[in-house]
Image (cartoon, coloured by chain):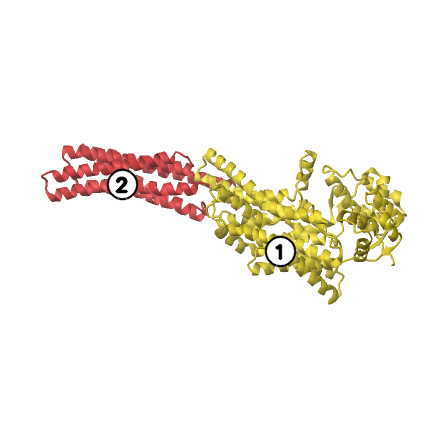
Amino acid sequence: MISLFGKTKALEAQTEEFCNKVSEGSLAFKIGLSAYLAGDQETFGEKQRHVSEVETRGDQLRRDIQRRLYVETLLPESRGDVLEVLENTDQILNACESAMWQFFIEKPEFADEVAAEFTKLVNTVVASVDALVSALRAFFRGDPSISDHMHKVIFYETEADKINHRVLGLVFDSDSDLSYKNQIRHFVLHIDNIADIAEDVADRLAIFSLKRAI
Amino acid sequence: MEIAVVVFLSSGLFLGWSLGANDAANVFGTAVGTRMVKFSTAAFVCSAFVILGAVISGAGASHTLGKLGAVNAIAGSFMAAFSAAVTVYGMTRAGLPVSTSQAVVGAIIGWNLFSGYPTDTAALLKIAGTWVACPLLAGVIGVVLFKLTAVVVAWAKLHIYRLDAYTRLGLILAGAFGSYSLGANNIANVMGVFVPANPFTSFSFGDFAAFTAVQQLFLLGAVAIAVGVFTYSKKVMLTVGSGLLPMSPVAAWVVVVSHSIVLFLFASQGLEHFLANAGLPTIPLVPVSSSQAVVGAVIGIGLLKGGRGIKWGALVNIASGWITTPLVSCLVCFVALFFLQNVFNQQVYKDSSYVLSQLAIDEIERRGVATKRLESLKDKRFESVREFRNILQLEMAPNEGDESTILDVARIDTILINNSKLWLLDSKPLSDEQRAAMWNVVGRKFVHRWTLDRALAEASDAWKPLPATKKNKLFNRRLQQDRQIIYDVFRIKENR
C-alpha cells in the first residue's frame, strides 16, 4: 500500500512538471518572438533552444506518464482521457517549437503596424495556453475552478481569431508582393493554431471533468 | 464422520460453491472488472473475510431460518439444500430472477409440508418483509452515502492519481467488509438447513475459546464459498464489472458499501444487542439477497442522478422472484423428499411423539392456552406430529400460536442425566456454574425438554432464562444453545 501511494506521489510530481513545462515553453516562446520582432536575434536564439529543450522534456514526461499508467494499471476508467489530454497538450509545445524554427529559417520581416498586431496575437495565444495549463492543473487536482479557466481559454482563442483577421487584413491591404503576403499569412495561421489546439484540449477537458464527477 | 454424512452435506457445499462463484461478484465485481483490484487480491480477501463472517457472525440469520422450520434429519437437510440449488440453477438457466435466500426458504416450507411440522407464519412474514426491505434499505443507504461521498471528494480536492489510489484501497476495504457481511448473512442459506441435524460436536479450548458445532458447520460451508470464489467467480466478476454497473469506481464503492451495510444489518447479533440495549427497535436477522441489495443501491443512486437509464424491469423481476422462487423451490423439495423417502428409503425427517400428561396440560394452561378441550386427550400418546396436529384440529381447532405452545409442551424428548456421561460436558462450551448445576439433576429422567429446563433453572441462575425482552434476546438465545448441548448429550431413545 505504501508503494501504491509512493507511485502516486511520483506520478503527481511528473504531471505537475509536465504542466510546468508547457507553461514554461509558452512563456519562452512569447519572449523569443518579442525579441525577434524587436530585432534581438541573440535572445531569440537562446529562447529557441530553450523551447526545444522544454519540448523534448515534455515528450519524455508524457511518455513516462503514459508507460506508468499502463504498466501499473492506474486510472483504469479515465486513463484514456488523461493520455489524450496530455498528448494534445504536448502538441502545443510542438507547435511552439516548429514556429520558432520557421522564424529562424525563413526570417520573415514585419512592417511596424503588423508587428504590433502580431505581438498582440502572440500574447493572446500564450494567455490561452496559460489558462489551459491552469485548467489542466485544476482537472488533475479535482479543483472546481476548472470551469473558470476553461472559460478563459475560449475567450482568448476568440480574441486570437479576431487579431488574426486584423493582421491578415493589414497584410493583404498593403502593396506587398503576394508571395510576402502568403508567407506572413502562413506565420499568422501557425501562431493562431496554437490557441485552437488549446481550445480543443479545453473542450475535451470539459467532458472529462464531467466524467470525473462521481 | 460417516461417508453418508459427507454425501448429505454435499448439496450444502454445492450451494456454498455457487454462492462463492456468483455473489462474490457483488462485492468485488466492479473492482476486478474495471481492473482497479487484481483478481488474486480480491479472491484472497473475499475468501478470508467470508470465512471470518460465517464463523464469527453466521449464527444470527440461521437462527431465524431455524424458527421457520427445523429440518431434523440430515437426508432432509440434504434434499432441502439440493432443491434450493436445483431451483436456483433451473431458474437461472431459464433467465428468471432468483435468489438463494428465497429458494432456501421455499425448500424449508416444502420440508415442513412433507413432514407435517407446522410453518411459523410469523417467522415467514418476518423473512418475507426483509426481502422487500433489503433493496429499499440498500437504495436509501446508497443515496445517503453517495451524497456524503460526493461532498467529501469535492471538499478534499484530491489529485486524480491520489483519488485513484484511495478508491483502490476503499474498494479492497469495502470488499473485505462486504465479504464478512456476505459470510455472516448468507452462510445460513448454505448451511442453515443442516443446523438441526448437525453432524459436528462442540468443543472448547480450555477456558479460552469455544468452537461450537454450528461454527464448525459454517466453517465447512464458508470453505465451499471460498472454493467457489477461487474457481469460478473471475468470469462473473468481469461480466458484472463491465456490463451491469456502468458507474465510476467511486460510485461503485458506494454500491459495495451500501450492499455490505445492509447484509451486515440483517446478520449482526452484536448490533441487535446494541440496539436492544439502547431501547431501539431491532432489525430481524435474516439471510437476504446480496444481488438484490446491489440492485437496490444502484437504483437509489440512479434516482439521485435524475432517474435516467434506470432499468425499472429489474425491480419488477425482483418482486416477481419473491413469490415464484419460494413456490418453485417448495414444490421441488416436496416432490424430491417423496422420492428420497420412498424410492431411496432415506429418513428425511424425524417424527416426534407427543403425550398430554396432567403435567403437560398444567404447563400449557400456565402458558396461557385454554386446556378444557384437551381433557379428552389426556394421557393419550401420539406417535407422529401429523397425527397429533390432526387430532388437535378436530378437538379444539387451535390458532397457530396455541398450537405451537401445545406441540412444544407435549413433545416427548426423553433425557436421562446419566452420571457416566457427565465427563462429555468437559469439552463443551459451558460455564463452570452451568457444569456444577448439572450435579443437581444427575440421575433424573425428563420426558419433556421444558421439564429439564425448569429443573436446571431451579438448580442455578446460570441456567435461568431472563424475561423475554428484546434486551435479553441474545442471552436467552445463547442459553438455548447451551441447553441444546445438554439435550444432545443426554438424549435417550425410548422403545415405543
Neighbour class for label 2 at 10 Å: few (<14), some, many (≥20)?
Answer: many
Residue at 33% over, 42% down: A201
Q: Which chain is red?
A: A
Q: Which residue does the numbered mark 2 point to in the structure image? A: A194
Disc 1 with disc 2 on a shared chain: no
Locate residue B392, reporting x and y percent: 81, 53
Horizontal side of B170 relative to A16 (left or right) equals right
Residue flagged by tag 2: what amino acid is it?
Ile
Q: Which residue does the numbered mark 1 point to in the structure image? A: B325
Neighbour class for label 1 at 10 Å: few (<14), some, many (≥20)?
Answer: many
Q: Is residue B45 visible?
A: yes
* Chain hosting mark 1: B
State whether residue A34 is above or below residue B296. above
Q: So how many labels did they put on this image?
A: 2
Quadrant hosting residue A83: top left
Q: Is residue B421 visible?
A: no
Q: Nearer the viewer, residue A133 or B440?
A: B440
Horizontal side of B169 relative to B180 (left or right) equals left
As helix, strand or loop, the secondary structure at mark 2 comes to helix
Q: Residue furthest bottom?
A: B343
As helix, strand or loop, the secondary structure at mark 1 comes to helix
* Chain hosting mark 2: A
Locate residue B136, reporting x and y percent: 57, 44
Residue at 50% over, 43% down: B303
Kindly report the distance in space between the C-alpha atoms of the residues bearing marks 1 and 2.
64 Å
Residue at 19% over, 34% down: A117
Q: Nearer the viewer, residue B79 or B39?
A: B79
Locate residue A192, reporting x and y percent: 24, 40
Q: Which chain is yellow?
A: B
Quadrant hosting residue B368: top right
